[in-house]
Image (cartoon, coloured by chain):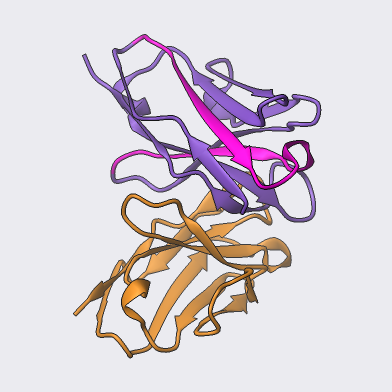
Amino acid sequence: DIVLTQSPVTLSLSAGERATLSCRASQSVQSNFLAWYQEKPGQAPRLLIYGAASRATGIPERFSGSGSGTDFTLTITRLEPEDFAVYYCQQYGNSPLTFGQGSKVEIK
Amino acid sequence: QVQLVQSGAEVKKPGASVKVSCKASGYTFTTYFMHWVRQAPGQRLEWVGLINPYDGSTTYAQKFQGRVIMTRDTSTGTAYMELNSLTSEDTAVYYCARRFGPGPATLGWFDPWGQGTRVTVSS
């Protein structure tokens, strides 16, 4: 199984700052089939990015995804108050699909 | 809008079974595979299995084979996941999620997700 390791585990930032989250795979993710989700307490996970870099419908432009092979990045250019949450990456290029352990973006 | 609404929290004793429902709205239920994913406390999200709402065919993660049953009711647009022989290790939040993407049904990304159902297994 592909193991996804996210870093950092916790990122403390202020609103307006830039957040850079990493997702590293234990082996190459086929066709860069990687997604990112945002999760807030008591809410359903929300799709942000699929195909490593394609924004889902309705997702603001401040969210962007990049990377290929084993290294992927989610960038939030200017944090808004509603962006403080936990972020997960998920690969769907190799069976079984797997998830990272999550990165929490908290208010500094 | 597209929405998945799950049933409420459950508390079960070891050895019991639990059945979680997931009601879809805002789209044609039979058009998209439905997956189930769970997250135990302190653990990462884990894939449980999927159902094809069109014909009811299922694929389960090896870990849950023989213990999970996924069904659907096309008349109400509802998917169900039943997990048997519960142990404390099954304590988790269970999510249903609509699948997108190319390739086999066992792979893909998910949008949207249900709000989650907390299942607690305790004596």
Residue closer to the observer: B122 or B114: B114
Residue closer to the observer: A24 or B19: B19
Quarter holding residue B36: top right
Q: Position of residue A29 (x, y in %)?
A: 65, 63
Q: Position of residue A1 (x, y in %)?
A: 57, 47
Residue closer to the observer: A12 or A97: A12
Image-based side of A11 in relation to B102, left or right: left
Q: Position of residue B26 (x, y in %)?
A: 66, 47
In the image, what residue occupies the spot 31% across and 13% down?
B14
The chain drawn orange is chain what? A
The chain drawn purple is chain what? B
Q: Give the residues drawn in magenta, as a range.
A: B15-41
> Number of numbered discs present?
0
User: Is the residue B8 above or below the residue A5 in the image?
Assistant: above
Q: Position of residue A4 (x, y in %)?
A: 49, 59
Quarter of the figure that contains the C terminus of chain B = top left
Quarter of the figure that contains the N terminus of chain B = bottom right
